[in-house]
Amino acid sequence: MHAPDGFIDAPVSIAAGAVAVAGVGLALRGATRELDDRTAPLAGLTAAFVFAAQMLNFPVASGTSGHLLGGALAAILVGPWTGVLCVAVVLLLQALLFADGGLTALGVNVITMSLVTVAVAYPLFRALVRVLPKTRAAAAGASFAAALVSVPASAVAFTALYALGGTTDVSIGTVAGAMVGVHVLIGIGEALITAATVSSVLAVRPDLVHGARELRRRPELRTRAAGASGADRAEPSQA
Amino acid sequence: MQTKRFFAGFLVVSLILAGIVSYYASSSPDGLEKVASDKGMAAQEREHALAGSPFGDYGVEGVDDGRLSGGLAGVLGVGLVLVVSGGLFWTIRRRGGSEARSEPRAEPRTD
């Protein structure tokens, strides 16, 4: 999904850069409310995980591959503002170090892969978590749906930017159809990876999943709770 | 699971994915590349300004073995992303442990 240099003309690339800077600036402010001594390291690790997972291109239809975008996953694990920053840092380092994603396309790529994926996935995830039963399986299902939708949404965002500033004379309907078609398939991979990761973390440390805090209350009521040992069990999640 | 152990496990998983599993990733063009070449959008593509950089295209310059080159690039990338983003997040975090806080601000509402 990383757009290279040359696909989008200079005015739209510059405008996209300005939007990306504004979005990342808002995220920097918002993330201060999501991050504390415990979640800041988790957010760094989440960004590293997104980088690693993005290297794992999986095959989809006929000679095409896809990779995780990671916006849904990061937003669910560490919060939407921090999630935006996680993916933006990954995109920045990919463009600067690994020649992946054009330098002039960085604004476009931050919009499509970071801002749009988070803006679509996180509200959807939260809405589903609210209406579904408060179980880990339901939260995993919600993360699957949110991740699945985020990828074609990202493809639509790219198509819209291409409609504004595309450098070749291609029918936008053709681009839209092809982009959404293949990215629905890639979205299934995104959804599987996201749901597997979110349920793994929920299984061991539900308190660390920002988007599913409802599940933090541990149903674990010890049967021998005659009160004697209550004090030393009162803090289930300390380091 | 202890927080430290959980964090260590999370990092090890990332390193294994980037350092080892990435070798088995599909080398087919991704969705956008495929659409771009099929529909003619790729005609205007320019080469990346840093295409010749030491870690361009997820390899390490001078390391001929593909498995080693890609694995090193992956491990390096995981480390750098962790340092850069972790440094950023640590700088902008609220100070003080979340467990220890009892002010209303301790449970930020973000939804």
Image (cartoon, coloured by chain):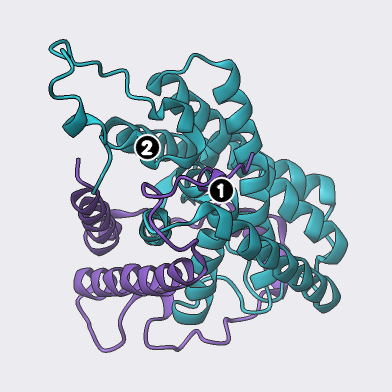
Chain colours: A cyan, B purple
Q: Residues within 10 Å of mark 2 (few under 14, many from 20)?
A: some
* Disc 1 residue type (three-letter): Arg
Residue B92: x and y in percent read 52, 68
The C terminus of chain B sits in image quarter: top right
Residue wearing tag 1: B105
**Which residue is at 26% across, 36% downward?**
A235
Q: Label 1 to label 2, Cα distance in Å?
A: 17 Å
The N terminus of chain B sits in image quarter: top left
Q: Residues within 10 Å of mark 1 (few under 14, many from 20)?
A: few
**Which residue is at 76% across, 45% downward?**
A176
Residue wearing tag 2: A207
Residue B9: x and y in percent read 21, 51
| Residue A229 seen in the current view | yes
Give a yes or no on whether discs 1 and 2 share a subunit: no
Answer with the quarter of the image where residue B70 lies.
Answer: bottom left
Chain identity of mark 2: A
